[in-house]
Structure formats: structure tokens, C-alpha cells
Image: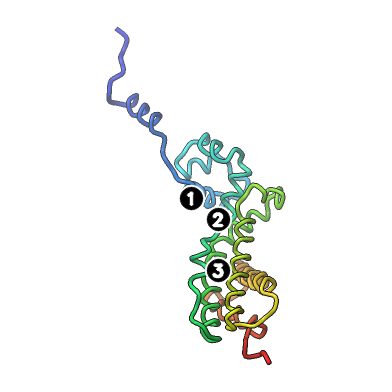
Amino acid sequence: MPATATSSGPVASLSVLMARPRLIDERELLDAARAVFIARGAEATTREVAEAAGVSQAVLFQRYGTKRRLFFAAMLPAPPTLDMLLGDMPAPGRDHARTYLVALAGRMLGWMDAAMPGSLRAALHPDFPEALADAHAPAGVEALAAALTARLVALQTRGDISGDAPGLVASTFLELLHGQALARLLGTTDPDDDRAPRAVSILWRGLDPGKLG
């Protein structure tokens, strides 16, 4: 008589695996992909990413369609949580405003430090920057700049800081912090250097309400 499948052994185990594909959320999948791509570059295969994530290649293509979309989604930072980065409005006053901006710069630097290795890999991809349209980073950066501008306007309205171009100040601040994060990654600055107060000090001459009048 032909052999029949039983409820135990390799056949049953394989059936369970096929019936219950591993569930993995997007953040976990992208974290695994980021680790692979940072280590191996864009030449890493979807098979390597799938193995690192513990899923099939089919799962990757179901979610992202192409390797390029997966690569840029993994390499470029997810939009920051704006409420967490901006924090609460400080108490009124010049000194409180400066202390707040230093803390804000520290939070933004932390986000940029984490995002920088992947961002550099993305910039080296032959499809950069055209492929940015498939990624989430540009919208996230624009939203961050807009939120920071709005916060600076609120501080100006209270008289805590001066200045007549909050949008320009916001973009300059972000560019300055980005440069510091890049320099730290490249090893051109002391890793223990307290960058946030230094960044605020560079801009403070134009923001200090004590300079008015």
C-alpha cells in the first residue's frame, strides 16, 4: 500500500510553515533590509534581504514591487515624529527659548545620526535622485521644515526670538545639523563633541531678541 501522510514528521512541519507564513511588520522588514544594504550596498540581493528578515522573496515583492523601491524605502529615513522632535513650547523668555532650541537640536541630531548611513548609501545609487519619488523621505523633510518654521514663528510672536525670515532660519538650521551629522559619520569631528549647543550658538546672533533696538 502507498504510504500515507501522518500528522507528524517533516510533511506535517512543512504544511504548517506553508499555511502560516511568518508575519512581519514594515518597520521590522525595513530594519532587516537596511542592515543588509548598508553592509553590502545596492548590490545585495533580495534573497539576502529575505533571509535576513526571515521571509520569502515573494513577500518583499508583494509589498514593494521592485528591489529599487525596497532599497530606497529601507535606506531613506522614515518621516520623523514631529511632535516628539519639536516637543512642547518652552516657557516665555529669551533664556527658555535658547535652552529649548538646544534640546530641539539634540533631538534632531539623534534622528539624523540614525538616518545618515542609509542616506549616504541611497545617494550612491545610480537611480538617485530620480528614485526619491518612490520613497517617503522628501515629504518627511518638507514636513519637518514646515513644522520647525511654524515653531519659530510662534517663538517670534511671543518675542522670545527675533528675525524676519523664519523659513530661511529653519532651512539653515536643518542644513547645519545635517552637516554636523555627516561630519560625525565621516569621523571628521569628535564623537563626544556636544554639537547641539554649538549649532544654536551659530544661529543665535540672528535670533537673540536682545539685539533688537
Q: Nearer the viewer, residue 22 or 104?
A: 104
Q: Which residue is mark 3?
A: 108
CA neighbours of label 2 inside 10 A, class few (<14), some (14 to 19), many (20+) = some
Callouts 3 and 1 close, C-beta under 8 Å: no
Q: Which mark is residue 71?
A: none
The correct choice, above or below, for 187 with respect to 50 in the image is below
Q: Which mark is residue 27?
A: 1
Q: Amino acid at mark 3?
A: Met
Q: Of the two numbered discs 2 and 1 on the same chain, state the one appearing first in sequence.
A: 1
Report helix, strand or loop for mark 1.
Answer: helix
Q: Of the two numbered discs 3 and 2 on the same chain, state the one appearing first in sequence.
A: 2
Q: CA distance from mark 3 to mark 1?
A: 20 Å
Is 13 situated left or right of 114 in this image? Answer: left
| Residue 13 locus on image (x, y percent) | 33, 29
Is 159 situated left or right of 83 in this image? Answer: right
At horizontal 52% and vertical 43% (from top left) the residue drawn is 49
Identify the residue at the far top of this view.
1
Identify the residue at the far front of this view.
157
Is 125 situated left or right of 13 in this image? Answer: right
| Residue 167 locus on image (x, y percent) | 67, 70
Q: Which residue is mark 2?
A: 78
Report helix, strand or loop for mark 3.
Answer: helix
CA neighbours of label 3 inside 10 A, class few (<14), some (14 to 19), many (20+) = many
At horizontal 67% and vertical 55% (from top left) the residue drawn is 123
Q: Amino acid at mark 1?
A: Arg
Q: Of the two numbered discs 3 and 1 on the same chain, state the one appearing first in sequence.
A: 1
Q: Nearer the viewer, residue 121 or 173?
A: 173
Q: Nearer the viewer, residue 154 or 22?
A: 154
